[in-house]
Amino acid sequence: DTEVTQTPKHLVMGMTNKKSLKCEQHMGHRAMYWYKQKAKKPPELMFVYSYEKLSINESVPSRFSPECPNSSLLNLHLHALQPEDSALYLCASSLSQGNNYGYTFGSGTRLTVV
Amino acid sequence: TQLLEQSPQFLSIQEGENLTVYCNSSSVFSSLQWYRQEPGEGPVLLVTVVTGGEVKKLKRLTFQFGDARKDSSLHITAAQPGDTGLYLCAGFNAGNNRKLIWGLGTSLAVNP
């Protein structure tokens, strides 16, 4: 298995809703990442988990809450989002946080906040 | 702050033409990664270069890492419509809190 699987593919939520994005990989990778991406722009790092511990939080607003239940799963809990949070949310993994050799990305969740 | 300058930002060419995309920095990277992204999908890793002066080929794509490991280029020969997409370079430096530094991307359109 060489994939990162993200669900759902698309999500529309109101500003008062609570929803979660899910990410799963079975490649034995010990680093997992959440990125946010706007159209035709590079991904922006949000969070990094290394060996299931939060390693980096790029000063992300608290309405985004990450969780890493085990080495294969990564969640992003969403609450009270703003319309400007609409974007493609990407999960990625790598062998380790210090790994030089590249990331495997999921297909992303297209989030629209109304 | 480490930066990666990627150029050109947009490129529209005819099928069969050649093109080169550049990624430049004043900083040294331990590796330089190239990704291709199609609309609505995640980036897909094309190649990682780690040795100064390294050249890697992937069918019609040729990647080069500069001798000083500060710059990289992607050359596509005889571009095809299937090459259309967003090309992103990303540099890795273990000293930068082990985060990838991303170029702004090159949006390539290959017209039949």
Image (cartoon, helix red, strand yellow):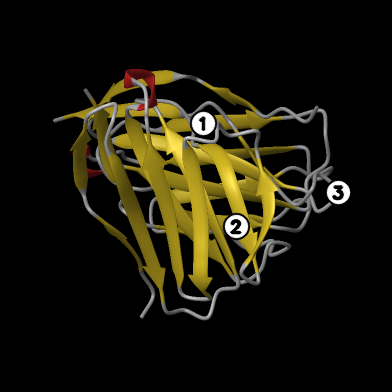
Identify the disc placed on residue B21.
1
Residue B39 position, x and y percent, is 25, 37
Q: To which chain does the residue with label 3 belong?
A: B
Are both tags, 3 and 2, on one chain?
A: yes
Residue B74 position, x and y percent, is 52, 40
Q: Quadrant of residue A62?
A: top right
Q: Is residue A97 left or right of residue A21?
A: right
Compute the Cα span from label 1 to label 3: 26 Å
What residue would you read off at disc 2?
B48
Q: Residue furthest left?
A: B112
Front one among B13 and B44: B44
Q: Residue furthest front?
A: A16
Task: Please say if the residues under marks 2 and 1 sit with CB atoms less than 8 Å apart.
Answer: no
Dot 3 or dot 2: first in sequence order is 2
Are both tags, 1 and 3, on one chain?
A: yes
Compute the Cα span from label 2 to label 1: 15 Å
Above or below, B68 against B86 in this view is below
Identify the disc placed on residue B95.
3
Q: Residue at x 53, y 26 (%)?
A: B104
Which quadrant of the rendered structure holds the N terminus of chain A? bottom left
Q: Disc 3 on helix, strand or loop? A: loop
Compute the Cα span from label 3 to label 2: 18 Å
Residue B82 seen in this snapshot:
yes
